Amino acid sequence: MTAEATVLETERLVLRQTVLADAWWLLGLWNDPAYIKFIRDWGVRTVAEAEVLLETRILAKYAENGFGQYVVMLKATGEPMGLTGLIRRPGLDDVDVGYAYLPQYWGKGYASEAVAAVMAYGLETLKLPRIVAIVAPDNARSIHVLEKAGLRYTRMITLPGDTIALKLFT
């Protein structure tokens, strides 16, 4: 990892830009049953397919928006455990904070720590006027992370091209 790839550091975490070499572990994240249930099934089953999704859905957004999803790693070991970042989504007027973690890292406060850092970065450094979040209505763990970050449920929304209503937190 190069120093210029690092975007943020917290007490326990390093957040860095995603790179093509992350495809191998992202394949596991994107195929985790909870990811598929609460976020989506991208239909990605090989590292090569994960590389294509990475290039088109994550890496392209850095160039397009100047921000995106960041790999969250344990500072002590450097092991990647999930993604947290800022996403411009069709159908949302504001930038969305999004995150997903491998299950072995749940319940340890990592998502809350990373979400707080990314939101502060977006508001203070990037000067975004507001950051929102969307979440599946039955994703209690994610809702807890958003509420801990100071976001509150506003209303149900359905994004363009989707059929599932999501909770919008502002």
Image (tube, rainbow, N blue to C red):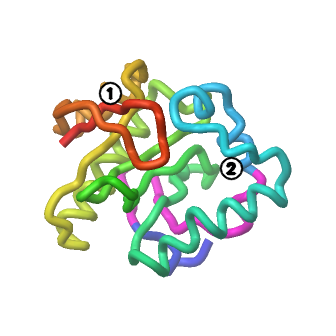
Q: Nearer the viewer, residue 156 or 19?
A: 156
Which residue bears the numbered disc 1?
Answer: 143
**Highlighted range, magenta:** 8-24
Label 1: how many residues lie within 10 Å, few (<14), some (14-19) or many (20+)? many
Q: Tell me: residue 163, above or below residue 57.
A: above
Q: Nearer the viewer, residue 32 or 80?
A: 32
Q: Tell me: residue 107, above or below residue 12.
A: above
Rendering coords of residue 157 (x, y %): 30, 37
Circle 1 sits in a helix, a strand or a loop, which is it?
Answer: helix
Earlier along the polypeptide chain: callout 1 or callout 2? 2
Rendering coords of residue 16 (x, y %): 50, 65
Rendering coords of residue 18 (x, y %): 58, 65
Residue at left offset 75%, top offset 56%: 50
Label 1 to label 2: alpha-carbon separation: 23 Å
Residue at left offset 52%, top offset 50%: 83
Q: Quadrant of residue 78?
A: bottom right
Question: Does residue 153 appear to the left or right of 139 in the view shown?
Answer: left
Which residue bears the numbered disc 2?
Answer: 26
